[in-house]
Amino acid sequence: MNYGTVLDKLIDILSAERGEKAPPLTDGQKPGYFRALCNVRPPEPVSDDFLQLQDEYLSARTRERGVVDAGKLKYNGNIALWRGDITRLNADAVVNACNCALLGCFIPLHGCIDNAIHSAAGVQVRLDCNGMMNGSLEPNGRVRVTKGYNLPCRYIFHTVGPQVDGKVTDTNRADLKNCYLSCLNKAKEMGLGSIVFCCISTGVYGYPKDEACALAVSTVKDWLKSCCNSLKVVFNVFTAEDEDIYEHELA
């Protein structure tokens, strides 16, 4: 695929929306510049021509990153641990730890999972979320569902985790537990076979990683025993530190 030509057209469309002209860019700079433009783009209607070009580009990038079959991971019971980029997994649903506006991350090229998922899936996710929220704010511990669009997964489950300021409170624990339960119950309701959880609230939201992991694992195990023994659950981590924490807890 000739990324240069496609990205030139995409960048020109987004720049024109902003009343700007794109600066001279090398081929190596174009992917990041395009992503940044999408990150800051408000949830406004977009042309069919743009969506066709965007989907062509993003789906090709997904194939290049390499799709990982969640069904072939190593499971202990119904639970697997996998370290890597969550946007590569082809499970029925992946969980996005989002902010309460539910519109994705507007910080250009930010390293959060919200930014990564929206950027890889396409601008349709922000548009869908905006249609659901209509300017309202999402409470902690619930779940909203959009299609996966250019991701390998079928659906994205958007959930807002608690923000911890200092010591973890009982409300923080209840909110985080409800994030997992809401997603699990929704997956069962939809008849899904697999779901991938990220490390909800442990990034900029400040929930201590070991405590969040212990709560996540115990909540999922209890739910599988009492509610559904057929759903495959993957804990997705991105760092070696998180992998060690989950390996210890799952053991």
Image (cartoon, helix red, strand yellow):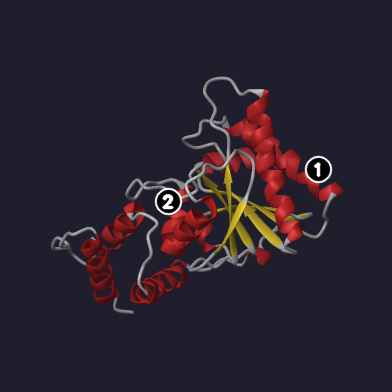
- The earlier-in-sequence mark between 2 and 1 is 2
Location of residue 219 in the rendering, given as x and y in whole percent from the top left corner = 74, 41
In the image, what residue occupies the spot 52% across and 23% down? Answer: 165
Residue at the outermost bottom position: 1
Indicate the secondary structure of the residue bearing disc 1.
helix
| Mark seen at residue 108 | none
Indicate the secondary structure of the residue bearing disc 2.
helix
When the figure is inspected, residue 73 is found, relative to residue 104, above or below; the finding is below
What is the three-letter code of the residue carrying label 2?
Asn
Location of residue 173 in the rendering, given as x and y in whole percent from the top left corner = 67, 30
Query: Which image quarter is the C terminus in?
Result: top right
| Mark seen at residue 222 | 1
- Residue 126 position by quadrant: bottom left
Asked whether residue 122 appears in the rendered view, the answer is no
What is the three-letter code of the residue carrying label 1?
Asp
Check disc 2 and report the residue beneath it: 115
Disc 1 residue crowd, few under 14, some 14–19, many 20+, Cα 10 Å: few
In the image, what residue occupies the spot 73% across and 64% down? Answer: 193
Which of labels 2 and 1 is toward the front? 2
When the figure is inspected, residue 248 is found, relative to residue 33, above or below; the finding is above
Asked whether residue 66 appears in the rendered view, the answer is yes
Query: Which image quarter is the N terminus in?
Result: bottom left
Determine the CA span between mark 2 and mark 1. 31 Å
